[in-house]
Image: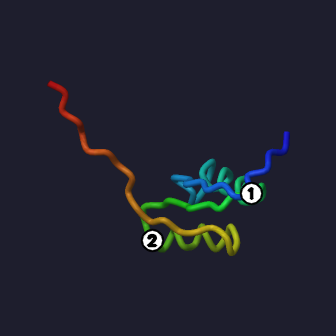
Amino acid sequence: MQEDFTGRVALVTGAFRGFGFATAERLVARGAFVAVNVRDSERAEAAARRLGAAPSPFPAILATPAISVR
C-alpha cells in the first residue's frame, strides 16, 4: 500500500543510519517534509544532504528529565 504523505511533517530520530535513515528515506519518497534528528549537528546535516533538498537537519538530544511521582 503506497500512502501519500504530501503536506505532512515527520521528525525521525536516529536518522543517520539503519532503520532511522530508511524510515526518513521512505517518508521523503512519499512526499513528507522530514526533520532528521541526530545528536551531532554534522551527522544531522550529512543525513539531510543524503536524503535530498527537502529534509531539514535537527541536531538535538531528545530526552525527558525524570519525573518525580509522589
**Image coordinates for residue 59, horizontal then vertical, percent:** 44, 65
Identify the amino acid type marked 2.
Ser
Residue located 54% across and 73% down the image: 45
Lateral position of residue 33 relative to residue 30, left or right: left
**Image coordinates for residue 42, horizontal then vertical, percent:** 48, 74
**Image coordinates for residue 10, horizontal then vertical, percent:** 60, 54
**In the image, is residue 68 above or below residue 26?**
above
Q: Nearer the viewer, residue 58 or 21?
A: 58
Residue 41 tag number: 2
**Image coordinates for residue 50, horizontal then vertical, percent:** 67, 70
Task: Say which element carries label 2.
Answer: helix
- Give the mark nearer the N terminus: 1 vs 2: 1
Q: Residue furthest top?
A: 70
Q: How crowded is the residue under tag 2: few (<14 C-alpha within 10 Å), some, or many (20+)?
A: some
Lateral position of residue 29 relative to residue 50, left or right: right
Q: Quadrant of residue 30?
A: bottom right
Q: Nearer the viewer, residue 41 or 3?
A: 3
Residue 6 tag number: 1
Q: How many marks?
A: 2
Q: Quadrant of residue 48?
A: bottom right
**In the image, is residue 11 above or below residue 56?**
above
Q: Nearer the viewer, residue 20 or 4?
A: 4
Name the image quarter holding the C terminus. top left
Residue located 55% across and 61% down the image: 36
Q: How crowded is the residue under tag 1: few (<14 C-alpha within 10 Å), some, or many (20+)?
A: few
